[in-house]
Image (cartoon, rainbow, N blue to C red):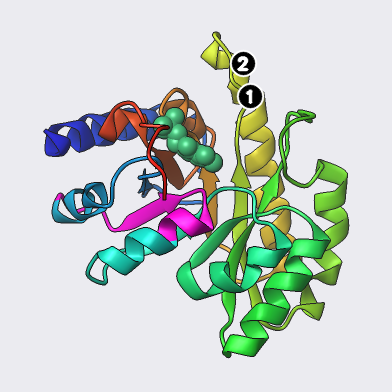
């Protein structure tokens, strides 16, 4: 039962919140983003019926298909790398783009949002572990881009997204999440806005560590919906 799985995730979140060694500026409430990628559209309906409100997809095309066949509902987050030629569709179909990972994509998102008369909420994705194959701003580039954000009037940066490295020793992710928290604090101090308020870190195999280190959004797929079906084509 999905309800039971959600309750188990929530219990583990609560435990992690209780284990925090210090108060975090990200607060004591954690949003569960239901990651529905590589599952059929009906999974989104089930998630919404079970009380989840935020839906995560990592491909624009797949999300568009699901939105087309489903009744309206849910707050959709893009969590996968965005190509510049898909910026317009992403702005049309997502409330939050979590995977803004370069100055170039910020430019394209800003232009697309201007064309659609929208102010697009985004997170800056940071590649904290410096992994070659992973997208995201290098920590130095993240700091360098902050003073330029005011040149994108149709973008509202809401915070930071971090993906930890895959590892058999989950404790190894802790320094990466701690760095994500420090970068979130820095961003908030630099921008001086109340609505810099989202720190998205942690997935099925490491979300409790992310919460201990300050995450207030976790992105969970397998823990809720089981294994993904990579043969599904959208
Ligand atoms: C797929 C994905 C997730 C969810 O992964 P699980 O391990 O199934 O929880 C979270 N974040 C991103 C960026 C993803 O691509």
- The 10 Å Cα crowd at callout 2, few under 14, some 14 to 19, many 20 or more, is some
The quarter holding residue 38 reads top left
The quarter holding residue 89 reads bottom right
The quarter holding residue 114 reads bottom right
Which is more foreground, mark 1 or mark 2? 1
Question: Between residues 143 and 18, which one lies in front from this camera angle?
Answer: 143
Question: Between residues 174 and 46, which one lies in front from this camera angle?
Answer: 46
For residue 71, side relative to residue 142 (left or right): left
Query: Can the viewer see residue 211 in this picture?
Result: no
Percent position of residue 52, x then y: 25, 52
The residue tagged 1 is 165
Task: Name the residue furthest top.
Answer: 168
* Residue 126 within the magenta-colored segment of the rendering: no
Image point (62%, 16%), residue name = 172
Residue segment shown in magenta:
50-63
Relative to 30, say whether 6 is above or below.
above
- Residues at marks 1 and 2 touching, judged by CB atoms closer than 8 Å: yes
The residue tagged 2 is 172
């Amino acid at each position: 039962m999905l309800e039971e799985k959600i309750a188990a995730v929530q219990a583990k979140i609560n435990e992690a919140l209780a284990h925090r060694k210090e108060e975090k500026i990200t607060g004591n409430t954690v949003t569960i983003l239901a990651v529905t990628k590589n599952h059929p559209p009906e999974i989104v309906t089930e998630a919404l019926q079970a009380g989840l409100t935020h839906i995560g997809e990592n491909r624009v095309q797949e999300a568009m298909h699901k939105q087309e066949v489903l009744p309206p509902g849910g707050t959709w987050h893009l969590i996968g790398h965005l190509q510049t030629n898909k910026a317009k569709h992403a702005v049309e179909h997502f409330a939050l783009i979590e995977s803004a990972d370069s100055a170039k994509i910020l430019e394209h998102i800003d232009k697309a949002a201007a064309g659609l008369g929208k102010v697009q909420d985004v997170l800056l994705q940071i590649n904290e572990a410096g992994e070659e194959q992973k997208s995201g701003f290098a920590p130095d580039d993240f700091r360098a881009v902050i003073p330029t954000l005011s040149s994108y009037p149709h973008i509202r940066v809401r915070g930071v997204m971090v993906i930890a490295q895959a590892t058999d020793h989950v404790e190894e992710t802790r320094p990466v999440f701690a760095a994500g928290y420090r970068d979130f604090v820095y961003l908030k101090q630099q921008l001086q806005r109340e609505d810099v308020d989202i720190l998205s870190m942690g997935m099925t195999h490491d979300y409790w560590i992310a919460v201990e280190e300050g995450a207030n959004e976790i992105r969970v797929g397998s823990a809720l919906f089981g294994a993904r079906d990579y043969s599904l084509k959208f």
